[in-house]
Amino acid sequence: MSDIICPVCKQSLNKDGNCYRCESRHCFDIAKEGYVNLLAGNHKAGESIGDNRDMALSRKKFLEKGYFSPLADKIAELVISHGKSTPTVCDICCGEGWYSNEIIKKIPCNMLCFDLSKEMVRLGAKRKNGATFFVANLASIPLADKSVDVGFHLFAPFHDKEFSRIIKDDGIIVTAVAGENHLFEIKEILYDTPYKNDEAPPETELLTLVEKIKVTKKIHLESAEDIDALFRMTPYYYRTAEKDKQKLLGYEELDVTVDFAIFVYGKQRKA
Ligand SMILES: C[S@@+](CC[C@H](N)C(=O)[O-])C[C@H]1O[C@@H](n2cnc3c(N)ncnc32)[C@H](O)[C@@H]1O
Ligand SMILES: [Zn+2]
């Protein structure tokens, strides 16, 4: 039985030729790239939700250069140390799927990846790396209760109710947020008074924080294109005035700190 459930009736969804089908015969076509759109209700079209094609391509190009490999390596390490053979792993809000691809290279697993953005999911599915990609909203994840060993969730909105529902009793959720010094050198160029990130763990009453891990490294951005791509991946890009954005234009290379705070959560134990 599949871990994926029908977004309409919540029964198990299984591959049936070119679609996924449940017992009540709700049917979801598999796109030519291999992903399936499981957005229910008003979101069905999925075309204009989430990041667009340019954002998705720019993110893919940047991540494939390996600047964020220390973070991917740490997530893979956590999956391996969770200790399950062929674990079910979910890349929650997977973006274009670079991180899950890095993990698949290191550990055989049943990798399930989803994102609200069809463009992101399409790019991820195109890698044909054995992961299952679907378009879905994290507020209603089409996965069965207690089906996931490790859910990882990087730089995206948090939803503790759904996260605690989909993980097994001994499962974990691994979340990463920007650490306090993340890209501080870029902020120093852009702003008169640069602030550090507050690095707080996402708040939850349903999951228990079991570990905090820091991954920090200096990277050398090799081109103006990479500097621009990284800046566009940050929330500050959308908050920075046009005149301040210009300040980055003269840089052809840059040494910057990448600083990630990883929080590992388990299921809350009942007293
Ligand atoms: C900053 S990106 C991070 C993507 C990926 N985790 C990575 O680190 O490369 C945030 C992602 O969250 C997705 N997202 C935002 N809201 C979502 C939701 N309600 N359900 C599913 N995905 C969502 C966006 O489409 C986007 O791909
Ligand atoms: Zn159904």
Image (cartoon, rainbow, N blue to C red):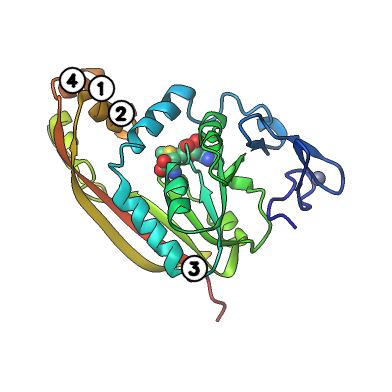
For the view shown, which residue lies furthest in the bottom direction?
271
Of pointers 4 and 1, the one earlier in the residue sequence:
1
Q: Earlier in the sequence, mark 2 or mark 4?
A: 2
Residue visible at 25% across and 47% down?
Answer: 197
The residue at 13%/20% (across/down) is 250
Q: Is residue 81 left or right of residue 45?
A: left
Amino acid type of the residue tagged 1 in the rendering:
Ala
Query: What residue would you read off at disc 2?
Result: 229
Judging by the rendered image, the residue that carries numbered circle 4 is: 249
Q: Quadrant of residue 247?
A: top left
Choose mark 1 or mark 3, whichever is in front: 3
Disc 3 and disc 4 in contact, CB within 8 angstroms = no
Total number of numbered discs in the rendering = 4
Mark closer to the chain start, 2 or 1: 2
10 Å crowding of disc 4: few (<14), some (14-19), many (20+): few
Label for residue 266?
3
Q: Could you tell me residue 262's position as x and y percent?
A: 35, 57
SS label for mark 3: strand
Task: Write down the residue under mark 1.
Answer: 241
User: Which label's residue is closer to the chain start, 3 or 2?
Assistant: 2
In the structure shown, which secondary structural element does the residue marked by tag 2 occupy?
A: helix
Tag 2 and tag 4, C-beta contact below 8 Å: no
Q: Name the spot of residue 216 as percent of width and height, x first.
A: 22, 53
Q: Nearer the viewer, mark 2 or mark 1?
A: 2
Q: Which amino acid does the dot numbered 4 rest on?
A: Leu
Spot occupied by residue 207 in the image (x, y as percentages of width and height): 50, 65
Q: For the residue carrying disc 3, how many other residues have a C-alpha within 10 Å: few (<14), some (14-19), or many (20+)?
A: many
